[in-house]
Image (cartoon, rainbow, N blue to C red):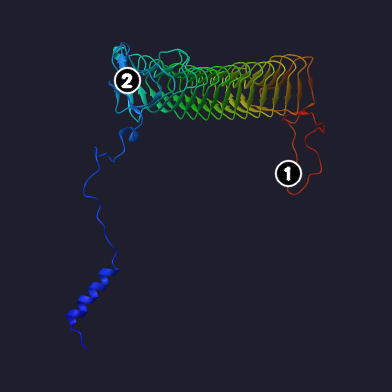
Amino acid sequence: MKHSPFRVSMLSAFVVALAAPVLIAGPLTPPAGPVAPTAKPLAEIEPRTAINSVNTPGDADSVFRITQPGSYYLMGDLIGVANRHGIEIAAGGVTIDLNGFSVVGAVSVGSFSGIRSTTAALSAVTIRNGIIRDWSGSGIELANFAVNAAMIDSVTVRSNQGRGIFLGPSGHVVNCLAFSNGVGIQVDARSTIVGCTVSFSTGSGIVAAERSHISQSTIANTGNSGVSIGIAGVVNGCVVSGNGTDGVFGATGAMVTDSSVCDNLGTGISVGVGSTISNCTLWGNEIDGIRAGDGSLIIGNTVRTTSLDGIRFASSCLVRDNVVSTSGAAGVGSGIRATGSGNHIEGNTSSSADRGFSIEGTANMLFRNTARGNTTNWVIAANNFYGPIVDRTASASVAVNGNSAPTNTLGSTDPHANFSH
């Protein structure tokens, strides 16, 4: 039996309809009660607190004041007013993100400090990511009330009449720039300063109390010392240049290593008793290159072009494997100078100085040292101990082209010999 095209088409449509999934619409009546929003609340989008007149109102001596722990942020530049701090911190556990904005003082009308603590014994304050400038006090001052464990990260402090950054004990300053302040950065005991650049301070560049550590930083062109470090302080991997007095001034037990110290108007590195200076490069310092107190270790340094002594030390020091050249002026400087007694002086080279080695005390021991081209190579007082001093200044030897030479041209086989050449 033949089927009409119309009937075939209707049958096909019926089969397709049976095969299709069943679509069921939702309820037309909404649930009881108000409709809840589906967007995230503001507290989830920005859980921090904005610094403004509503959230952090100021008082008689501050534009803004933080009184509760928490995380805070700037929404724009803060412009200081006369006789007020920019931000007062009166609580511990506070983080301030400057958000790339500036905290700007008004030096001409006597604004105080940019950010300052006003409550005793706070701890755990962090300030990061912005610029603090032009305050008649300090840029950041968290020391007068002994804030412990403050961190300053990626902040520029510029043109503040007091200190750029001033922290209490156990502070940490990292990746900061201090330019043209009274003192660049000052920290109390057990603090660290890492990766900072400090320049054009009218006073000192960095001042750190005992047991602090300064590393991988550049300190230049200050009116006073480049770095001043307290008892058992450490300076490592720094460049210190063009400062108004000493490059690095250290107290008892200081350690200065792997640093470049040049063109300072005082002594390059001056440290107290029981200190270590190693693997440093010093040149062009106006007074001495290195000056160290009793019982110090001075090893592996290069010292060049000083007006007085290249390396000067007192008693009971170990001075080894240093290279010193071009020390002294008008006959008064020495490459290596021992002013005291009981020193061990070994393997050093002194050249082009007024006096190569000047040994003034007693019971000093000298061996394997070399003096060359000094006005006077050796000046050694009585009652010291030294290996033979061999004069090679006028000696000549034949050329060598090959694997061996038949003679010893040193003039001595003594392993403790010192040489002039």
Residue 147 horizontal/vertical position (percent)? 47, 17
Decide if residue 21 is on the left or right side of residue 92.
left
In which quadrant will I find the C terminus?
top right
- Which dot marks residue 56? 2
Q: Residue at x 20, y 85 (%)?
A: 3
**Dot 1 crowding, Cα within 10 Å, few <14, some 14–19, many 20+:** few
- Give the residue type at disc 2: Thr
Q: Which residue is mark 1?
A: 399
Residue that extends furthest to the bottom in the rendered view of this protein: 1
Q: Residues within 10 Å of mark 2 (few under 14, many from 20)?
A: some
**Residue 8 position within the rendered picture, expressed as x and y whole percent measured from the top left:** 21, 80
Q: Position of residue 354 (x, y in %)?
A: 64, 21
Amino acid type of the residue tagged 1 in the rendering? Ala
Horizontally, residue 193 falls left or right of residue 91, namely right
**Rounded to the nearest whole Å, what is the CA distance between mark 1 and mark 2?**
83 Å
Identify the residue at image location x=49%, y=30%: 195
